[in-house]
Image (spheres, grey):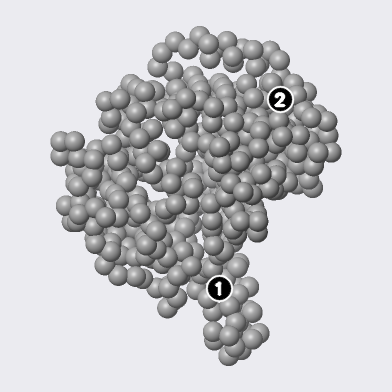
Amino acid sequence: MRRPELTPTRSRSRRAHHADATRRRLIGGSRLSDFGRPDGFLDRQLSTWRRQLDASRSRETPDLDRLQTALEADVPETARTGIVHGDFRLDNALVIGEGDQAHVSAILDWEMATLGDPLVDVGMFAMYWEIAGLPGALASAVPSAVDPAAGTPSLDEMIAEYARQAGIPVPELHWYRAFAAYKLAVVLEGIHLRYQQGGTVDDGFDQMGGLVAQKEQWLRPLLNAEIRSAFCMTEPDVASSDATNIDTRIVRDGDHYVINGRKWWSTGAMNPDAAIFIVMGKTDPEADRHRQQSMIVVPRDTSGVEVVRPLTVFGYDDRDHGGHAEIVFRDARVPASNLIAGEGDGFAIAQALVLKTAWLMDTAGNKQAMTEIQSIKIAVPRGVQQIVDRAIQLYGGAGVSGDTPLAEMYAGIRSLRLADGPDEVHLSSLGRAQVLRRAGS
């Protein structure tokens, strides 16, 4: 429950950080022979993204279609198989320490990982240098942690470092960089489709104006660790493990939304650096059950926002990340542009991203993946809790004292069985999936 101080990447050692991120990239083979299906990986990736484009079409895209055809006609031979992260970029690097002591502690966001051609990751990694070179609002629409003015090394330097540490010649990346651009274009076409279908609220969303404004105002400071945020979903009066139960209302009033509701277990909200709260509430209680909810950005200093009290976990205040809080929103008014995505998109945002799900479907199959994920969420916290419990028993009285970390560890793992969804929810979903699978076999 404790973690090191998180700090932004400082310009004086940024080159070292980027080299460190490259070094921590898992390159080469692994012993995880059943982790994925490396044979045919690139062909499956193209097929997955082609289906995604077909599902996102709202207009003719001849240039994108030509790029797709060119990619399919010239699929490279995979020179070596390795772990593919699936969303490898600087934003997923966790940096701890400051100045010359700062280093990459971990690479995050591995849910799309599989075995395949690792140059797919390198191509996506390179794409963010291209994005950083885009003019003005276009670069803001898809934030990139690449910042040459702050000391980020050139792409050629980064690729050379990757090759050196992988023990390979500098790779030819034209196809992989084109594939990365293709994937990004498909994502943007999906956003445009939502705009065409009325799934967004800003008049300028056809040019991603609202999204650009949000990212420029809030996401960049978050990525630079200048501010922090807290997610406000759980409520004291309803079973919030099912996001469709929430009662907080988000009501449109002209060019603003007005928020009323009570939240608790808002992690990190007690940290004074938590400048924004991302609030989930209902914009249309009469809509389809999974289209009632929306998410909206509420600045901490908004009139009508009251941080009522800190909450403790088995008596621990979790002060390392700022602590959990109970928060009341009373007629809190924010601009309509603070809405994230569109009205009714809150549940989808809370559950998963469609494109990440598509990647998981490609590597494991959607039904199998869901079963494994649910099983893990049930078994792992229980298993770890049992291990800590045995350690406490071994230490006797010292195990429940403050002289060892065991009591705090027990509190943390026990609370995880609620925080990531109660066991009962996962068991119910897993059981239902198994019954449906047997019924269909």
Tell which circle, 2 or 1, labels the residue nearer the N-terminal end.
Answer: 2
Q: Is residue 200 above or below residue 419?
A: above
- Under mark 2, the amino acid is Leu
Are dots 2 and 1 in contact, CB under 8 Å?
no
Q: Position of residue 390 (x, y in %)?
A: 63, 79
* Secondary element at image label 2: loop
Which residue is under mark 2? 173
Q: Is residue 318 above or below residue 338?
A: below
Quadrant position of the C terminus in the picture:
top right
Identify the residue at image location x=53%, y=48%.
434
Image check: 360 left or right of 266? right
Q: Position of residue 61 (x, y in %)?
A: 48, 12
- Under mark 1, the amino acid is Met
Q: Is residue 428 above or below residue 195?
A: below
Q: Position of residue 34 (x, y in %)?
A: 73, 44
* Secondary element at image label 1: helix
Task: Give me the C-alpha separation between circle 2 and circle 1.
Answer: 45 Å
Q: Position of residue 145 (x, y in %)?
A: 54, 40
Which residue is under mark 1? 409
Categorize mark 1 by other alpha carbons within 10 Å: few (<14), some (14-19), many (20+): some
